[in-house]
Image (spheres, rainbow, N blue to C red):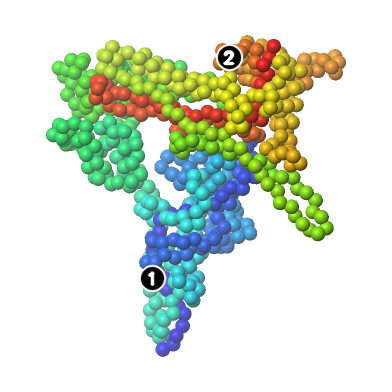
């Protein structure tokens, strides 16, 4: 018998893990939409759940421990580790490397419209956190002799993707909730036992057998199978909730709670029981079965056909829409009933439409989709001239928000021979506001279907979409013309703010004064620490009455003398807004780029940029109801990025 240290090898299955990192903000390139980030330092974190007791995890950043191929070859930049939809990818990893004990990467953001708010928040410093998703294939026990908790070092691991995340750096980041997506991981533990040669040989043979079995495991096949199972579960729950007119929030809750399909059916029945007589509901849904994938194609085709009727120039027909092209609303309702095995023979128009709304046909969902599309399309296409000079943000709730402005750092002073450093101080200022909710409900009833009134079903939601966009413009320009007091008790445009000019028409004299006043604006520090901000005007904002005159002042001319040169040719981007005419046809404004200094802020509820719609099958009407809601707040944040001239 002899006493010696041996290595004990075991096999476990691990889900994907994640670890928080951060941005290197000074590396952001707004034009290329790239930024460098630090995705790992390999620091020790506390984990639990893989072994019998909690343990510390270390990530080895040795080049031979990290499988870098996936990151180096265009790994995705995701939105909070979500990978169920191609729209979840918001960018791409252009390069990745290991340096000085840390992992770095350069990522590029997509130019899609839905990614623009995320990139804007990165530029503004609102979103500052990144997380790396990775898999561990080998853990090495590196515990000390007197350690209370074991320490396992990942000596073979692979970063899979990088994600933007809202929560701050968390060294104790835990395992992702979906533990179906597993991969094999070898755990090498150090033990100290009394063993003879025969026992040691048996352990070594057993370890080799484990390694052989592990080599047969195909992690990619496991991943694909798990993703396919999750896709089917999500699809089935979505179809069931849509079939019975459930709210989207209820559907999301079932999916995100990892509820099995059978349990989802039970909860849907409970939900239906709350709405109507129990026996009637049970008769209606007794034959619940998973909707086939072709149902999605059928609904999409019907929606496309109606959108083509609404505006053929914008909405083209594809193959899936041809079976429904040219159908009236009543004919489409009948077709949806037939495709869901509902009897329609002998029904009057009124009875047919009533059954289409109350049955399990796809008809209500199709009408909702068309109304929502026309509403959102009109909202997105509505002209909003304020977007270039206003900063867009998201607030988590409706509580008052305080936008704090820190002053500049105090000026550095020469240190005397005794080496004494003097203390400096900073000040701040804050503007407060909160979100408000605006909304209306649109009803689509049986009369619209019987009369084949596509105009009412599309034009009215479109008008509501335009109305929501116009409301945002009213709020922004209301801040400008309202000239309300700031947190210092002085109105937005005031001589004490050095942003109110001597009355002048748009031209060299007025532009020159505006440029001088904006460049000489100072920060919050006073006295010897006062600093100039050198704010640069970027936008010239005028009422419609001054558009032509302003265009002339910004147009280059061929000069025959130096004093005839138009020094302001192309100097500013001209923005014409008719809402300003209602206040004054003479007054004009200038604004800086919001990336240089705060101007006006428009805020939406987190995750709901612009108008948001919800659909409900009506009980007080024979049809469906669509609620258009806008949660928004607007406030001037800093007077130094804005300038006003009363005009002449």
Against 383, residue 65 (above or below) is below
Which sits in the foreground, 108 or 552?
552
> Residue reaching furthest front?
489
Q: Give how far across and how far down residue 290 sits, in percent.
A: 25, 38
Against 240, residue 373 (above or below) is above
Q: Earlier in the sequence, mark 1 or mark 2?
A: 1
Numbered circle sitting on residue 209? 1
> Where does label 2 land, which residue?
583
Q: Quadrant of residue 579?
A: top right
Q: Give how far across and how far down residue 564 sits, in percent.
A: 82, 15
Callout 1 secondary element? helix
Whether residue 616 sits left or right of residue 429 in the image: it is left
**Residue at image coords 54%, 34%:** 432
Which sits in the foreground, 576 or 262?
576
Residue 586: tell me if it is visible. Answer: yes
Q: Quadrant of the N terminus?
A: bottom left
Whether residue 368 sits left or right of residue 385 in the image: it is left
Q: Residues within 10 Å of mark 1 (few under 14, many from 20)?
A: few
Estimate the spatial distance between the alpha carbons at disc 1 and disc 2, rounded to whole Å: 84 Å
Callout 2 secondary element? helix
Q: Residues within 10 Å of mark 2 (few under 14, many from 20)?
A: few
């Amino acid at each position: 018998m002899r006493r010696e240290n041996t290595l004990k090898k075991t096999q476990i299955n691990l889900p994907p893990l994640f670890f928080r990192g951060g941005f290197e903000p000074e590396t952001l390139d707004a034009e290329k939409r790239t930024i460098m980030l630090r995705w790992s330092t390999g620091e020790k974190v506390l984990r639990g759940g893989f072994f019998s007791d909690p343990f510390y995890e270390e990530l080895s950043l040795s080049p031979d421990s990290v499988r870098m191929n996936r990151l180096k070859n265009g790994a995705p930049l995701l939105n909070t580790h979500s990978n169920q939809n191609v729209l979840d990818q918001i960018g791409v990893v252009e390069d990745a490397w290991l340096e000085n004990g840390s992992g770095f990467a350069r990522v590029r953001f997509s130019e899609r419209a839905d990614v623009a708010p995320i990139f804007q928040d990165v530029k503004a410093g609102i979103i500052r956190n990144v997380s790396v998703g990775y898999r561990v294939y080998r853990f090495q026990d590196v515990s000390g002799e007197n350690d209370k908790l074991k320490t396992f070092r990942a000596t073979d691991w692979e970063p899979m993707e990088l994600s933007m995340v809202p929560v701050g750096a968390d060294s104790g980041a835990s395992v992702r909730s979906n533990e179906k997506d597993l991969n094999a991981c070898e755990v090498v533990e150090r033990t100290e036992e009394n063993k003879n040669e025969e026992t040691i040989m048996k352990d070594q043979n057993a370890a080799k057998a484990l390694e052989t079995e592990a080599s047969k495991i195909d992690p990619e096949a496991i991943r694909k199978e798990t993703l396919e199972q999750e896709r089917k579960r999500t699809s089935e729950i979505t179809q069931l909730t849509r079939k019975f007119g459930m709210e989207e929030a209820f559907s999301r809750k079932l999916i995100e709670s990892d509820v099995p399909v059978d349990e989802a059916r039970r909860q849907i029945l409970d939900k239906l029981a709350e709405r109507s007589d129990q026996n009637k509901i049970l008769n209606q849904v007794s034959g619940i079965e998973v909707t086939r994938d072709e149902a999605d194609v059928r609904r999409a085709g019907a929606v496309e056909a109606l959108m083509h009727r609404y505006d053929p120039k914008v909405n083209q027909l594809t193959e899936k829409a041809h079976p429904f092209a040219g159908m009236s609303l009543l004919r489409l309702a009948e077709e949806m009933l037939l495709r869901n095995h509902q009897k329609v023979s002998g029904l009057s128009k009124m009875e047919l439409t009533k059954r289409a709304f109350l049955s399990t046909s796809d008809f209500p969902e199709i009408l909702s989709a068309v109304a929502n599309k026309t509403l959102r399309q009109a909202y997105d296409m509505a002209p909003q001239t304020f977007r270039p000079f206003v900063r867009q943000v998201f607030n988590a709730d409706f509580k008052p928000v305080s936008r704090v402005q820190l002053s500049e750092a105090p000026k550095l002073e020469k240190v005397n021979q005794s080496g004494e450093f003097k203390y400096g101080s900073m000040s701040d200022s804050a503007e407060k506001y909160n979100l408000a909710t605006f909304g209306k409900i649109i009803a689509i009833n049986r009369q619209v279907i019987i009369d084949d009134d596509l105009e009412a079903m599309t034009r009215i939601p479109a008008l509501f979409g335009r109305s929501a966009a116009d409301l945002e413009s009213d709020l922004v320009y209301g801040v400008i013309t309202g000239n309300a007091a700031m947190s210092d008790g002085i109105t937005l445009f005031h001589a004490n703010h050095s942003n109110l000019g001597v009355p002048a028409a748009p031209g060299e004299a007025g532009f020159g004064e505006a440029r001088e006043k904006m460049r000489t604006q100072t920060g919050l520090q006073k006295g010897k620490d006062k600093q100039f901000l050198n704010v640069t005007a970027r936008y010239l904002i005028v009422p419609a009455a001054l558009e032509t005159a302003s265009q002339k002042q910004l147009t280059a001319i061929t000069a025959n003398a130096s004093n005839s040169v138009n020094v302001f040719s192309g100097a500013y981007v001209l923005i014409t807004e008719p809402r300003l005419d209602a206040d004054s046809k003479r007054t004009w404004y200038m604004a800086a780029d919001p990336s240089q200094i705060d101007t006006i802020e428009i805020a939406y509820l987190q995750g709901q940029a612009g108008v948001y719609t919800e659909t409900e099958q009506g009980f007080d009407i024979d049809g469906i109801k669509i609620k258009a809601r806008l949660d928004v707040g607007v406030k001037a944040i800093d007077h130094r990025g804005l300038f006003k001239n009363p005009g002449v």
